[in-house]
Image (cartoon, helix red, strand yellow):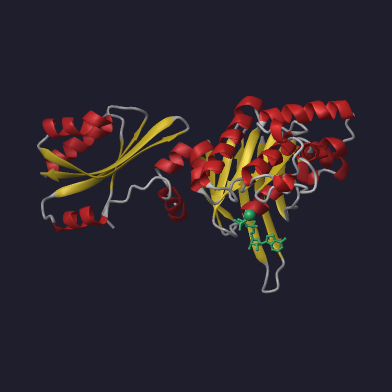
Amino acid sequence: MIVVQNVSKTFPGRSGDVEALKNVSIQVDDGDIFGVVGFSGAGKSTLIRTVNLLERPDSGKVIIDGIDVTDLPKRKLRGVRKHIGMVFQQFNLLNSKTVRQNVAIPLVLEKKPKAETEKRVRELLRFVELEEKKDVYAENLSGGQKQRVGIARALATSPSILLCDEATSALDPKTTESILQLLKKVNRELGVTILLITHQMNVIKEICNRVAVMESGEIVEQGNVLDVFGNPQHDITKGFVKTVIDDTVPESIRKSILEDNRQGKILRLKFTGISAQDSLLSRIDKTFNVETAILSATVSELQGTVLSILKVRLTGRNDEIAKAEQYIEKSGVEVKEVTLE
Ligand SMILES: Nc1ncnc2c1ncn2[C@@H]1O[C@H](COP(=O)(O)OP(=O)(O)OP(=O)(O)O)[C@@H](O)[C@H]1O
Ligand SMILES: [Mg+2]
């Protein structure tokens, strides 16, 4: 478990100090794939680097598996770092060394016997599906292959935690997808807890179970992916969520609604799971004296759970609309009245 507790970090700069982290707290539980998302300069890299103390916080604590690492002497810190692997956006490979030699680096540094190192490297290359490239120089690999080497190298000492700093940001969408699947496999099959940072919300959507949103050195929102995606609170979060789940009412529909003078109410309905959402609206039409119109609809899958968001307009008498609304709520659907802004 990683606990970052009230961590602050300020860098001195020519045009004044930069507060890269302001009283940041997160908790990453064992088995999580925890994603931190934010725009450039939000403080994401600084945050992830405080976890293995590549960056020392000015105040606050970083506690890993119950040990306050901000307090440890250097010698003991090395021991803790062995349990933390790190993957970088630019791969950080030695270009004039082969795939095998790159993956072996952490084991060579630990002075492991040669046979043991070779066996481990073979295992790792099989895991990242790069066995046939073992003698190729790193400079001759594609971006996706380089990141597979980066991941294998990070796993060499069998860490329990993997930190990923924009691991897929230099890759095309298809390669990104395959690297995300590999990270999922690292999490599921090896039981490695992953803390990743990204500016791409689809990365969070694909593999994370928890998410924190950062802006100007602060965490503005955090929680389970399903909750945050289903009900983003902060404007920054809403913007990020919109890039992957867009529940905006199309302009032409919005215009025609604004021109329609009938009495009505616009509701945002959130369904989780494969529920009876298909028949709900037709049941309402039949049961109550209201007319329903769908203004926008999105269906996505997060963490294996289907999340559907519908914006509907109910027209009719106020008392009939109120009854219909109660009926929807009773069906286990989250209902919120919204306006067409
Ligand atoms: N070593 C440093 N010295 C001075 N300023 C720094 C240093 N590292 C980071 N900063 C500043 O701290 C702020 C946060 O930087 P950080 O690299 O953590 O952001 P980020 O969210 O990772 O951004 P990006 O998405 O561009 O990687 C920025 O304003 C940056 O310029
Ligand atoms: Mg960064």
**In the rendered image, the vertical position of residue 124 relative to residue 252, given as above or below:** above
In which quadrant is the N terminus drawn? Answer: top right
Which residue: 73% across, 26% down? Answer: 123
Left or right of 22, for residue 115: right
Q: Nearer the viewer, residue 326 or 108?
A: 108
Which residue: 45% across, 37% down? Answer: 226
Q: Nearer the viewer, residue 183 or 264?
A: 183
Left or right of 251, for residue 47: right
Which residue: 18% across, 40% down? Answer: 322
Q: Quadrant of ligand 1?
A: bottom right
Q: Position of residue 191 (x, y in %)?
A: 65, 27
Q: Nearer the viewer, residue 135 or 305?
A: 135
Query: Can you see residue 108?
Result: yes
Q: Nearer the viewer, residue 27 or 273?
A: 273
In which quadrant is the C terminus drawn? Answer: bottom left
Q: Position of residue 166 (x, y in %)?
A: 61, 48
Which residue: 50% across, 38% down? Answer: 206
**In the rendered image, the vertical position of residue 108 relative to residue 122, given as above or below:** below
Query: Can you see residue 222?
Result: no
Q: Which image quadrant is residue 179 in?
A: top right
Q: Position of residue 40 (x, y in %)?
A: 57, 58
